[in-house]
Amino acid sequence: MSDQSSGESRQQTRYKQADSLVAATVRRAWAPLAVAAMSSLVASAAALALPAVLAAAVDGVLAGRGAQAAWQLGLVLAAMVCADLMGALAGAASTASATSALRLRFTIHVLALGATGARTHPVGELVNRLVNNTATVASVPLTLLSMATGFIASAGGVVALLMTDWRAGAVFLVVVPVASIIMRLFVNRLSGLYGAYQEAQGRLADRLTDALAGIRTVRASGTVDREITRVLVPLADLSSAGHGLWRAQARGVWQLTLLLPLVEVLVLAVAGLGLVDGRLQPGQLLSVAGYTALGLGFVGQFDGLMGLANSRAAAQRVAEVLALPSPAPGTRPLPAGPGALAFRGVTVTHEGTPLLDSIDLDIPAGALTALVGRSGAGKTTLALLAGRLMDPDRGTVLLDGQDIAVVHPGGLRGAVAYAFERPMLLGGDLASAITYGNPELNGDAVRRAAHAVHVDEVIRRLPHGYRTPADTAPLSGGELQRLGLARALVRHARLTILDDATSSLDTVTEAKVIRTLVEGMRGLTRLVVAHRATTAARADLVVWLDNGQIRAQGSHQALWRDPAYRALFASDTEPISGDSSGEDSSCPARL
């Protein structure tokens, strides 16, 4: 019972978050929405006037005054057409404005979540919510406006019906509560079904994104058919949710479809008796028919209700991401310093499993420090913490004595540079990709950085050189990594972090790059996630991580005496003479 209550409470929370997001979307689109609202009100007023004008035209024709009635009827129709046209243009502008604002907010928040926060949802899911769900939510302001003006027109039609013939109006009002109950139950039922449908769409998009990202592996493994089957697994849930939607719509539609003609027949029967009794004129009977149709307009908001249910489900999915807590940006400047890095009691957990456990570590200023350990030891997590690409659950990370959590992001980004295993080339052409985030850097600085990591010749061989579009540049994995390294080096930051950024380089090229790190960046602090003994051998300090804890630290030569340490580099077969220490202490060559 408690689990059921907890589930209902979570669902109510999601509904509140979704409704809050919808309200915020309406507020952001207020300007074009106001124009659309005015146009809708004019159109509604004209629609309310039309039955009376039409009745007057009929009575005028019967009385021989047709010209004046025709002029009034033409004026009302012209007002309706102009208002509808203006409303359509303003409505399109409102939806576009709301979509743009919501997508911008979503993108900013996802980027602010950092490396760990963004991983709470698969990439395909985030893309689906950004592209599809935000557009659905952005249509809410116009849908609500359309429904509101529809209800206003319906209310006006009911009032006019009562004023024309109160008996016919009373019959109409008896049936209205029944239709309202049916519509409310219908919306509540559809909201959950639309949510299930959109979740299945998101899973399908995520699986397809994964398959496209690994298309070479799929083709090389000959598993295309199996991968197609895996991608299409969510189709069963998609089909189930879709059929559920159709069944819900069918139940709601037949109930309302049966109700509407019954109301019209009863109202017109009462009005017809009034005409027979002489209580109503022929034109008034026509007015009763027109106002009955207007009064039933609120039931005609069926499509709007389905759209609203769909939008509410989409809003839950968008609000779920926006509700994820993002790290609060710091406000203090980073004091000048040589780049000393320190970790104090740092702990990071993921789903209850510690990735780092109570880490206390000092990285000397100006030193080259290598992080080593088996896969999953916590090397990348520690590297991400160093530049605040993620925050620890407990503990503090200090750069030159200042807690980086309170440092202004601009100051921190200027002091810390990163190079990653799979760098993304952003910014346009290759020159812009190297200066990404630092557009003020000139061409000479770009070329020096590229030359330092031995990628300058590669770029110059391309037909357009440094102006080659980054997304079409024919570069190998190792060449891409060198461009990522150039992007880090060009900044000349006090702390440079290389997260497995040389893994795709051949041994000779890596040796040249490591020489640059050792000699060309002397005096700057460098933190390198290392998988090769040759890299660790050139480091001033090696930190050995094991299961989220520091197992040992010291020089590579000192750690090499431990067989477990040597086992980390079992695939590294470049022997050299090491120091004498009794047992097998031969150490891979120092470059």
Image (spheres, rainbow, N blue to C red):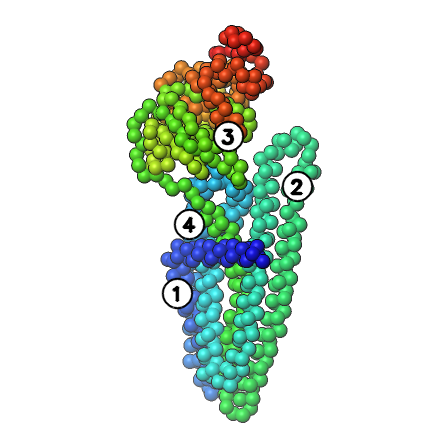
Label 1 close to label 2 by CB (< 8 Å): no
Q: Is residue 490 visible?
A: no
Q: With respect to residue 390, does 233 lie above or below?
A: below
Identify residue for label 2.
230
The CA distance from mark 1 to mark 4 is 23 Å
Earlier-in-chain disc, 3 versus 2:
2
The CA distance from mark 3 to mark 2 is 34 Å
Earlier-in-chain disc, 1 versus 2:
1
The CA distance from mark 3 to mark 4 is 41 Å
User: What secondary structure is marked by label 1?
Assistant: helix
565 left or right of 540 in image: right
Earlier-in-chain disc, 2 versus 4:
4
Earlier-in-chain disc, 1 versus 4:
1
Q: How crowded is mark 1: few (under 14 residues within 10 Å), some or many (20 or more)?
A: some
The CA distance from mark 2 to mark 4 is 35 Å
Residue 361: percent from left, percent from top: 42, 26
Q: With respect to residue 181, does 124 lie above or below?
A: above
Identify residue for label 1.
38
Identify residue for label 4.
101
The kind of residue on which mark 4 rests is Ala
Residue 548's tag is 3
Label 3 close to label 2 by CB (< 8 Å): no
Q: With respect to residue 332, does 320 lie above or below?
A: below
Residue 322: percent from left, percent from top: 45, 48
The kind of residue on which mark 1 rests is Met
Q: Residues within 10 Å of mark 2 (few under 14, many from 20)?
A: some
| Foreground disc of the pair 3, 4 | 3
